[in-house]
Image (spheres, grey):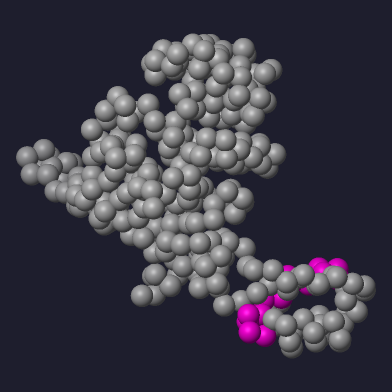
Amino acid sequence: MADPVILLDNLSKTYLVPERDAGVMAAARSLVQRRHRAIKAVDQVSFRVEPGEVVGFLGPNGAGKTTTLKMLSGLLHPTSGTGRVLAYEPWQRQRDFLKVITLVMGQRNQLNWDIPASDSFELNRVIYRVPPAQYQQTLEELVELLELGPLINKPVRNLSLGERMKCEIAAALLHRPQVLFLDEPTIGLDVTAQRRIREFIREYNRRHNATILLTSHYMADVEALCKRIVVIHHGRILFDGPLAELVKRFSPHKTIAVELEHPIESNQYADFGEVVTQDDGRLMLRVPKADTAKVAGRLLAQLPVSDLTIEDPPIEEVIEQVFAQEVES
């Protein structure tokens, strides 16, 4: 087996946050006697990512996702534990390490707003010392994949959010990194722009066997790109495994969507399962997995069904169930 591209072993990050009571006297006392509270942003996180894997790194706001990515990209030093990315210790920020990784943060800009994106691209070429021939080849590939032709010569401030995000991603990949840390790359984008970014990430992974660690609150990103996910909450790993296994383990229900030839009395639905929604001849039921086949048979036999679909619950619901079980334990 090849060595992992990313390896974390009990990686932790603790922040000391100053605290004080309200009021002028409390403010005065804090000048000579500060009080701090330790907050564990990341708490003994361990996992590995193999070459070419695309792994979803999921959790609610404040779970420790971005802090972990910042440590792996060398922006933060850990409090304890170890981490390796392509055999480098990230927080040493060696030049050779910086040439093989990139960090894309959907809420941060690296492009200069007052000049065309192409000028920022050229600046990145110089910073990363990319040979002109390689740069031109990579730029042409990115322009094709991201459909940037009409955009790169416009001032960045004149681009829409989706157009700007595509240029941000291109700028981050001009040096052909082997490892991509993507922190909410589709945040705030419309559905069409999200789909195009996902398609690009998939194709970049296929062409270059890039290893990708992706955070996103859009489950469509995760379902489209990631076979494996790592779920983190309060800085600790709750789940690490295939997406299908997460659904199997944490969701005891299936969803049955039914379309009827004509509406019927709503009280006739109660015996089939929990009614999630019903509207003008359309019905959605939540039923225990073990009863799915039996309930579907009864629906077909007893109701004027024109269409019936059995689905796993939305990933959002499954993730919420993971968090709920963690709180209960």
Percent across and percent down for residue 63 are 38, 54
Locate the C terminus and report the quarter of the image it occupies.
bottom left
Q: What stretch is highlighted in magenta?
A: 277-291
Q: Is residue 220 left or right of residue 213?
A: right
Percent across and percent down for residue 67 are 34, 44
Q: In this view, does 31 lie to the left or right of 301?
A: left
Foreground of the two, 255 or 266: 255
Foreground of the two, 97 or 328: 97
Q: Is residue 284 magenta?
A: yes
Q: In which quarter of the image is residue 203?
A: top right
Foreground of the two, 32 or 105: 105
Residue depicted at x 32% and y 30%: 97
49 relative to 142, above or below: below
Residue depicted at x 57% and y 18%: 137
Q: Quadrant of residue 96?
A: top left
Q: Does the magenta stretch include residue 323?
A: no
> As drawn, which residue projects farthest toward the left?
32
110 relative to 297, above or below: above
Q: Is residue 22 visible?
A: no
Percent across and percent down for residue 13 are 25, 48
Q: Is residue 166 left or right of residue 5?
A: right
Foreground of the two, 150 or 276: 150
Percent across and percent down for residue 141 are 61, 24
